[in-house]
Image: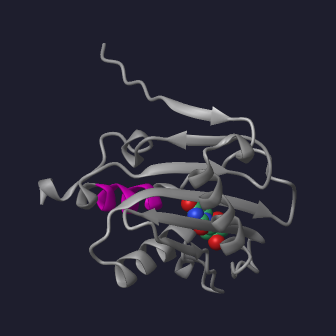
Amino acid sequence: MKRLEIQYQEFAKIQELNQLDELLILAAKAALEGSYSPYSNFQVGAAARLSNGSIVTGFNIENASYPVCLCAEQTTISAVKTQYPNEVIESLAITVKSAHSTVNQPATPCGKCRQLLSEQERLNGSPIRLILNGEIGPVWVFKSVNDLLPFSFTGEWL
Ligand code: THU
């Protein structure tokens, strides 16, 4: 039998993060306010920190035709790639807020976004750290997208 193990850090609150990570989560929380999510009433904000120190943000954009909805990770990656095509993404903070209840634990990226981020990580040539937080409560830090999508499908098969 083979065994796969992942490790991640948990911080009790965002104030326990280092200053750069706390700033990135705060940028994601600010971005979340731009979310267009009238159907789910679930706001998602993301903020990427690049190797040149820039922070690029995004949020989810929904549509009456539900499959057209864009996740916050998608809009953020689009913004990064159009504004800074040559920069490496060092960290990505993702945060959520629901109109239905207070989200008190981190929400992890959906499968499609894990696949999107995974390929960007490969292009990057270095891991993208993920910093995840709900509206309140603990923060989870993963050192690589790959930790959330082991055995990912890659272009090597094509
Ligand atoms: N959503 C994201 O923005 N990112 C994810 O990884 C999961 C889901 C958005 C899509 C939709 O607008 C809302 O959250 C509810 O699914």
Q: Is residue 47 left or right of residue 16?
A: left
Q: Quadrant of residue 34?
A: bottom right
| Residue at x-position 57% and y-position 78% | 69
Q: Which residue is drawn at 61% across and 41% down?
A: 140
Q: Is residue 158 or residue 137 the one in the foreground?
A: 137
- Left or right, 73 with reference to 35: left
Percent across and percent down for residue 133 are: 68, 50
Q: Classify 113 as above or below 63.
A: above
Q: Where is residue 144 in the image (x, y as percent from the top left)?
A: 40, 44
The magenta stretch spans which residues? 112-121
Report the side of 1 relative to 77 (left or right): left
Foreground of the two, 110 or 122: 122
Is 21 placed left or right of 76 in the picture? right
Where in the figure is residue 23, as x and y percent of width and height? 63, 59
Q: Quadrant of the N terminus?
A: top left
Is 72 contained in the magenta span? no
Image position, residue 126 (x, y; %): 29, 50
Predominant SS along the magenta part: helix
Answer with the quarter of the image where residue 119 lies. bottom left
Q: Quadrant of ligand 1?
A: bottom right
Query: Number of labelled discs?
Result: 0
Residue drawn at the location 57% of the way across and 33% of the way down: 9
- Does 59 sit above or below residue 96? below
Residue at 71% over, 47% down: 14
> Between 40 and 120, which is closer to the camera in this rendering?
120
Task: Identify the colour scheme used.
Answer: one colour
Q: Quadrant of the C terminus?
A: bottom left
Is residue 113 magenta-colored?
A: yes
